[in-house]
């Protein structure tokens, strides 16, 4: 494994090891952590372990800056929740917070130092229009402007076109299920909603098993995986936190099968265990891995792709491999999301628009 | 500062290093690591950054930047280059091969602007004398760089012409002495005041017209670790047709103006608010309308004496 | 930075609430004030926004921090302080409340609709 990747994984596994890093090692860790969206996390770890004051000034400066940015991100999420609460006064409807917003609202350890740019929520399908209308009446506006974008979202995605509040420049994504309807995985949103736990009169978060399964399916079935180490850190933290109760692992396995997400879970457990020392019991790992049906050659290719794509290459050390792995996985994740003809059309429209330069 | 610290020189060694492992050098509180394969840019860079202290093994890198070809073949056919910091979502644009220094400076500016949230950062020029700093916020093109450069050639220590870096805990400003970017009409004004070798070659037809980089004065580089609190905030406004005058700003206006110049104040939240409030309490703020550089330098010296 | 108490007819922040709604200031300890002579500025740590507040708006916010009130109770209290007729103060209070609500400085406790 690359030296910089090994160093970053070491301090993510064991933050106390930050204390022994040389300046040269810090140069690599800080760059890679930033590229992975994990600088805030490294800073939060340094603070939690009381290491900030012992670090060299240049390193400390960068971590203090990253900590401030993460604090601001957290404050913004809480503020957007407050504004959504105000915009939806009245009807007794459950809004489930997803990802970063959920971690912050539920006070989970993976919220520490985490930077989210958008807020993601989920409501049952029959409440979509109501929520969209309520937010638009309170000043949120459509972001995706072209008719094609609007149609694409409404037909093929698991969320409404994103809404932005122009005064606060904050974006909200409203989902009705956690994966696109065209994905080969089809977890039943009603089941996820049913087990979601209310945290106040308006907002809920997924049950413990479902928080992990959502993050895993987002990273390993839906996302592009590129730079996805941050998500894997979330998953490792969720495993540490929820794994404290003995019945979590059997419940997790049962739930993954009930929702049809056994395979993303197998990837998540495997890589969180291998790369980040997640405390997954051996029997849970073995059981989960039975969901990986691929014969060895294909599995090795996947394994290589995943490891290369999770951690982006260093600016001064670009190996062609990482870019290729990223592209392969991008194609793969789109292939998982859409019928094949759809894929060509979608990529075609995007590329065409890039060529014309009408949008970034 | 001990002179055992090595500086950037116009040596074959550093010329080679820029292409291979890159050069790591200190600029105030930051360590930049830059690299580029372009010959012309490497010449320009060493000329402009000669005398900057190289970072030691004991210092971690703050920014990585390379200036690279936009596409492999382009580099030979029709050179086009761009800055690359390795992150997605950077605003860098391809530039003609002649404008490498511009790509480098814009790249470094972007890195400072987006990753220095340890400091409350002002879009401002900054000079110091007698342990007191003057903050001069202002948009590009109103004479901020020219006045900063002029003052730094008249007995003031140069801190920055672009980024005022305030430590919100100590309320001291940190120097960030980078090459001063002189544009268009301001070039002849400064050219007559400095030795020709201090000015980089003209970069023509940039998005902002003609640019020449002025090397920071020697004392600015030697004392780049010496911070200073601000005692005065000035809003320079060069206008050859107006009556020259100094107008003091009422407190609420002073607060609103300096907040507007604080680039990252939304990212610093409460920390920024407290620092801005303290800064507004401590410093008087003036609008400075002037007709010539010499006049402005006299006005600033008078203000410094009478409004300490 | 936004100026408070120059209410305009911009967007509401949510469903309008009845006149019986009680307005409260959530987490007043997270409001940081700084006096600038003629006006004050307040930093709302919840929103990350800084607002310029004129004396009347300042007083109105202070009264709501003291205890949550309806619009009419706030009007009565301000009219008493200013020794001005309630009919004159009322519209100002309405405008201030609308703006406070839009900026998220206050939140309705009871909705009657």
Image (cartoon, coloured by chain):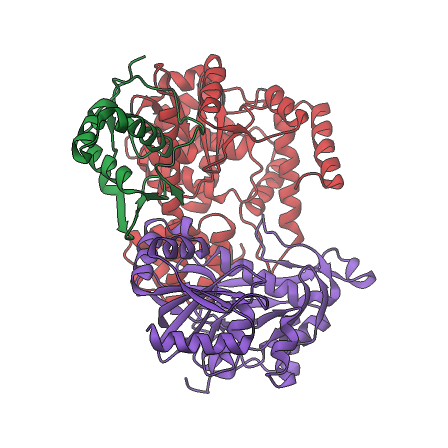
Chain colours: A red, B purple, C green
Q: Can you tell which quarter of the image residue A150 is in?
A: top right
Q: In this view, does A148 lie to the left or right of A135?
A: right
Residue A358: percent from left, percent from top: 71, 38
Name the spot of residue A94 as percent of width and height, x first.
Answer: 37, 18
**Front residue of A188 and B235:** B235
Q: In which quarter of the image is residue B201?
A: bottom right
Q: Is residue A282 left or right of residue C63?
A: right
Residue at 67% x, 54% y: name it.
B93
Q: Quadrant of the C terminus of chain A?
A: top right
Judging depth in this view, the residue of B91 and A349 nearest the camera is B91
Residue that appears at 48% across and 55% down: A6
Who's the residue at 44% across and 53% down the image?
B260
Front residue (pair A158, A337): A158
Where residue A301 sits in the image (x, y, percent)? 62, 40
**Residue B77 seen in the figure:** yes
**A170 horizontally vs C20: left or right:** right
Q: Is residue B54 visible?
A: no
Residue A51 spot, x, y in % from top left: 30, 59
Out of C76 and C25, give the one closest to the viewer.
Answer: C76
Height in image: A78 above or below A63? above
Instruction: Give the tally of numbered discs.
Output: 0
User: Does residue A263 sit above or below A89 in this rendering?
Assistant: below
Residue A328 falls in which quadrant of the image?
top right
Q: Is residue B111 above or below residue A93?
A: below
What residue sits 60% from the left and 61% below the top? B106
């Amino acid at each position: 494994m690359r030296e910089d990747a090994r160093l970053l994984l070491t301090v993510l596994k064991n933050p106390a090891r930050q204390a022994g890093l040389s300046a040269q090692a810090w140069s690599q860790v800080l760059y890679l952590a930033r590229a992975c969206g994990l600088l805030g996390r490294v800073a939060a770890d340094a603070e939690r372990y009381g290491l900030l004051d012992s670090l060299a000034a240049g390193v400390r400066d960068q971590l203090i800056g990253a900590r401030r940015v993460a604090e601001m991100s957290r404050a913004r999420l809480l503020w957007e929740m407050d504004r959504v609460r105000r915009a939806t006064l009245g009807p007794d409807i459950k809004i489930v917070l997803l990802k970063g917003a959920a971690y912050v609202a539920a006070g989970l350890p993976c919220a520490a130092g985490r930077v989210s740019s958008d807020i993601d929520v989920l409501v049952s399908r029959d409440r979509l229009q109501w929520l969209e209308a309520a937010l638009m009446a309170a000043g949120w506006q459509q972001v995706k402007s072209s008719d094609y974008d609007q149609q694409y979202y409404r037909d093929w995605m698991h969320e409404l076109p994103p809404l932005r509040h122009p005064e606060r420049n904050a974006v909200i994504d409203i989902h009705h299920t956690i994966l696109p309807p065209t994905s080969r995985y089809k977890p039943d949103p009603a089941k996820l909603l049913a087990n979601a736990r209310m945290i106040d009169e308006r907002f809920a978060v997924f049950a413990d098993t479902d928080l992990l399964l959502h993050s895993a399916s987002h990273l390993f079935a839906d996302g592009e995986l590129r730079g996805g180490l941050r998500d894997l850190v979330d998953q490792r933290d969720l495993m540490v936190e929820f794994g404290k109760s003995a019945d979590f692992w059997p419940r997790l396995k049962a739930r993954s099968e009930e929702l049809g997400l056994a395979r993303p879970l197998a990837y998540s457990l495997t890589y969180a265990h291998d790369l980040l020392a997640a405390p997954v019991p051996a029997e849970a790992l073995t059981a989960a891995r039975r969901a990986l049906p691929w014969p060895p050659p294909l599995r090795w290719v996947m394994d290589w792709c995943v490891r290369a794509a999770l951690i982006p290459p260093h600016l001064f050390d670009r190996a062609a491999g990482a870019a290729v792995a990223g592209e392969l996985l991008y194609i793969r994740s789109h292939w998982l999301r859409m019928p094949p003809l759809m894929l060509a059309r979608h990529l075609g429209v995007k590329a065409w628009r890039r060529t014309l330069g009408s949008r970034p | 500062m001990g002179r055992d610290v090595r500086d950037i020189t116009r040596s074959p060694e550093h010329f080679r290093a820029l292409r291979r492992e890159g050069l790591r050098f200190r600029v105030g509180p930051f360590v930049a690591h830059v690299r580029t394969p372009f010959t012309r840019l490497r010449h320009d860079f060493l000329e402009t950054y000669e005398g900057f202290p190289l970072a030691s093994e004991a210092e971690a890198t703050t920014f990585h930047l390379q200036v690279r070809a936009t596409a492999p073949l382009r580099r030979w056919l029709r050179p086009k280059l761009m800055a690359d910091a390795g992150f997605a979502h950077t605003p860098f644009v391809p530039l003609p091969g002649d404008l490498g220094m511009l790509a480098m400076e814009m790249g470094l500016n972007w890195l400072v602007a987006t990753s220095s949230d340890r400091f409350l950062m002002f879009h401002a020029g900054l000079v110091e004398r007698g342990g007191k700093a003057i903050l001069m916020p202002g948009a590009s093109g109103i004479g901020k760089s020219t006045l900063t450069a002029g003052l730094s050639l008249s007995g003031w220590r140069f801190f920055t012409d672009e980024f005022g870096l305030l430590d919100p805990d100590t309320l001291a400003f940190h120097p960030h002495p980078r090459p001063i970017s002189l544009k268009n009409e301001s070039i002849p004004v400064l050219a007559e005041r400095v030795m020709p070798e201090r000015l980089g070659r003209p970069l023509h037809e940039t998005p902002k017209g003609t640019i020449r980089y002025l090397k920071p004065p020697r004392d600015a580089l030697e004392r780049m670790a010496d911070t200073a609190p601000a005692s005065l905030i000035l809003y320079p406004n060069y206008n050859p047709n107006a009556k020259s005058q100094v107008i003091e700003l009422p407190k609420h206006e002073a607060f609103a103006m300096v907040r507007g110049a604080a680039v990252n104040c939304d990212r610093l939240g409460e920390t920024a608010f407290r620092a801005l409030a303290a800064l507004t309490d401590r410093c008087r703020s003036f609008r400075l309308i002037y007709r010539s550089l010499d006049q402005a330098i006299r006005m600033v010296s008078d203000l410094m004496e009478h409004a300490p | 930075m936004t100026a408070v108490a120059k209410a305009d007819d911009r967007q509401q922040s949510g469903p309008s609430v009845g006149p019986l709604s009680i307005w409260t200031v959530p987490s007043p300890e997270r409001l940081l004030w700084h006096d600038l002579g003629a006006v004050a500025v307040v930093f709302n740590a919840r929103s990350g926004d800084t607002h310029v507040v004129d004396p009347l708006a300042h007083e109105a916010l202070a009264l709501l921090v003291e205890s949550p009130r309806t619009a009419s109770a706030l009007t009565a209290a301000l009219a008493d302080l200013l020794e001005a007729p309630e009919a004159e103060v009322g519209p100002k209070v309405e405008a201030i409340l609308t703006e406070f609500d839009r900026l998220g400085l206050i939140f309705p406790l009871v909705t009657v609709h």
